[in-house]
Structures are given as structure tokens and as C-alpha cells.
Amino acid sequence: MKRFVTVALAVALCAFRARAQNQPESSADNLLHRGSPLLAALDINNNGVLEAEEIANAGKSLLKLDADKNGALAESELQPANPDKVSTADRNRSAVLMTTLDLNGDGQLDGSEIAEASRSLLKLDTDGDGQVSKNELNPGKAADPDDRSENSGRHGGSGDHVPKPGENKPN
């Protein structure tokens, strides 16, 4: 009898683990447990790059964090479940994202800011390739979106001056 109970418990445990592993990671609860909620919501494939499709769906993705379903993200909905487990790099990238998305600077994302998320994120795309790379998410890059001389994307980091629209390239 003891052996039957042990085997039954082992089978039940295996079934429980298999079921837990097959749960989708799209719910807000799962996103919050992956570190930075903003990064988890926006970087769907978790490769560190916000690709064109992820940027295009940014508003929809952000609303997955909307726990109270009011169409806005309060500061509490943007906080990681375990702040101590968020790396410094992810914390810095989240700060760049929040600065970019929070147009009125109130520490929250209202409905209009969420609706403009795709457009706001494209401001971080300094090399114009339609995506936001890890380099473009660095805090120094967010300060001057017109600076294309740093080593990111197709400009190769040579330091050459890239003219702004309407500016003539120096000889």
C-alpha cells in the first residue's frame, strides 16, 4: 500500500509539473515574475531587441500589465514583483523605456501614452532600422536620439558624423 501511494504521488507531481510548464506566459502574472515588467511586456521573444513587430504591438502588449483593467498603467503595475532579482542592465533599460513612454513624466502610463507607445519607442531607433537594439536601450542613447555616432547598428561605431535631416554632411 505504501508503494502505491508513493507511485501515485510521483505520477501526480510529474503531471502537475508538465501542466505548469505548458501554461502560456502571456498573462500579467507571468510577465511580472520575469523581472522588469516593461521589458517583459515589450520584448515578447526575450532577445533584448525590440523588433518591428514588437514595437507595432507595444500598446497591446503594455495593456497586459493593466491588472485593474482601467486602460492605464499605475506606478504599482509597472513595478517588478521581485525588485532584487532585476539586473542593473534591465533596470537601466526599463528607466529608458519609462522615460520614453511616460510623455507627461508622472510615473504612470495613461491611455494616450499607451496608444502612442509604438511612436514613442521608434524615437529610440537611432539607426533607423525599425527596431530598438540593446545599444539603443542604453541610458546614454536615450538622452540624444540624434546621436548616431556610437557603436550601434549599421553605422559601425566609426564615430563619423551622420547628418541630421536637412543638414549637409561636412567635407
Image: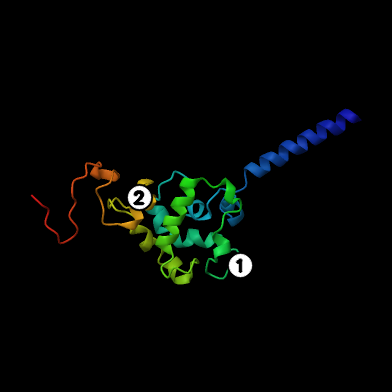
Residue furthest top in the image: 3
Q: Position of residue 29 (x, y in %)?
A: 61, 54
Dot 1 falls on a residue whose secondary structure is: loop
Residue in front for this viewpoint, 2 or 38:
38
Q: Position of residue 164 (x, y in %)?
A: 19, 58
Residue at position x 43%, y 57% in the image: 97
Can residue 45 be seen in the rendering of this structure?
no
Question: Do the residues under discs 1 and 2 have CB atoms within 8 angstroms?
Answer: no
Residue linked to disc 1: 68
Amino acid carrying label 1: it is: Asp
Q: Is the residue 44 above or below the residue 18 in the image?
A: below
Dot 2 falls on a residue whose secondary structure is: helix
Quadrant position of residue 145: bottom left
Residue in front for this viewpoint, 149 or 33:
149
Q: How is the image coloured?
A: rainbow
Residue furthest right in the image: 1
| CA neighbours of label 2 inside 10 A, class few (<14), some (14 to 19), many (20+) | many
Residue at position x 56%, y 71% in the image: 70
Amino acid carrying label 2: it is: Glu
Q: Position of residue 4 (x, y in %)?
A: 86, 31
Q: Is residue 92 left or right of residue 151?
A: right
Q: CA distance from mark 1 to mark 2?
A: 32 Å
Q: Is residue 47 left or right of residue 128?
A: right
Q: Which mark is residue 24?
A: none
Mark closest to the chain's N terminus, 1 or 2:
1
Residue linked to disc 2: 136
